[in-house]
Image (cartoon, rainbow, N blue to C red):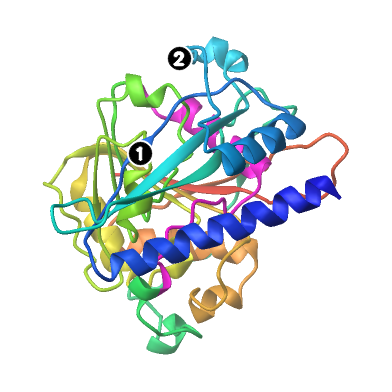
Amino acid sequence: FILRAINTIAIMKIGYWLAAAVAAACCAPPSFALSFSRAKSITRSNFIQSTASAIFFSDIVASSPACAADKDKMQENPRYIENEVQMKYGDDSKGNPRTRGVLVRRFTGDSTPYSFKTSPVSLVKEWPESPPFTQKDFFRADEGDDENFYTLPRLVYHIDEPAVASLTQYYRANIKPGSSILDICSSWISHYPLEFKDNMKRISATGMNPLELMANDQLTDYEARNLNINPALPYEDNSFDVVTCVVSIDYLIKPIEILKEVHRVLKPGGKVIISQSNRCFPSKAISMWLNMNDRQHLELINGYLQYAGFGKANAYDITASVPGERFNDPMFIVEVTK
């Protein structure tokens, strides 16, 4: 009963914070003050206790040792990190400054009981010379303004922890230190290993919500952009070694145009890593995606890439194995080199 009460109060409190933030945003430009600190691996009970503490006493419950950057030490990294994200509105001479904090929990992808393997998936569909898609294929149940849909920051995960961990481990094994990375359709997390912040040359991002991007502490720079309206990427030719896109390509109504831009900003020899699960916002996913299975999704992404100027891609099933669990979110990769 106590835990239910705490969870209920937490939900009500967060709802109040978001409502207050929206109301304040109507009368003053928002700014975003962030407070991050890395925490030790925590248990569910400790997390609930610290959440309750944050609710009732406004404490920032996070203190941590330095995170290991070496691949061989990945099991020394904490499994979870707690951050308090503080949103400040009306921070000017005429405004009425208000600060609201939201406690978020990040999956690091490390120190988990999961096991990982990469299994190749054959791509067999032969695509015609010209794209066979029609306007109906890209119809969405909700054709309303995407910027309205994504106005409020969603500091949550859209795939489960095993899927996150499998993607993090794939990135660690397949992206070289010193790379320049672009994460398109990004948010408050990019699922990169903890050490990427320190050992990559640059991590840039585009995404729908500027507040979510500001909360992403792995980014070097970012630009909020609705690629469904303006598919042009705000970067020079041959700028990046790797471009990633996580569980988002199903929302793009101009995927070939956007991937042509990805091709432009990639360096020769650079690669695209598109990851996909089976979760989505059905109202925002395109029609033909909703009528396909996981295997067909991979073939479709390969088709997009070919029409954007890439060669044939490689696909992999990187779904994590979870002890004692038969069902968890799948995770697939489609990867191609420029």
Is residue 127 visible to the viewer in this orientation of the structure?
no
Q: Is residue 305 above or below residue 42?
A: below
| Residue linked to disc 2 | 69
Residue 11, visible in the rendered structure: yes
User: Residue placed at 48% from the left, 77% from the top?
Assistant: 286
In the picture provided, is 57 more to the left or to the right than 135? right
Percent position of residue 183, x then y:
34, 46
Amino acid bearing label 2: Ala
Q: Residue at point 75% right, 37% down?
A: 321
Taking the spot 61% from the left edge, 51% from the top edge, the residue there is 159
User: Compared to 304, does 31 lie above or below?
Assistant: above
Who is closer to the viewer here, 256 or 306?
256
| Circle 1: residue type | Leu
Counting from the top left corner in percent of width and height, residue 81 is at: 55, 30
Local packing at callout 2 (Cα closer than 10 Å; few below 14, some 14-19, many 20+) is some
Q: Is residue 62 above or below residue 187?
A: above
Q: Which mark is residue 19?
A: none
Task: Find residue 216 and report its image quarter.
Answer: top left
Vertical placement of 248 versus 324: above or below? below
Circle 2 or circle 1, nearest the eye:
1
In the image, the segment drawn in magenta is 149-177
Residue annotated with mark 1: 34
> In terms of sequence position, does the residue under pointer 2 or pointer 1 come before the other?
1
* Position of the C terminus by quadrant: top left
Q: CA distance from mark 2 to mark 1?
A: 23 Å
Instruction: Say if mark 2 contacts mark 1, CB within 8 Å.
Output: no
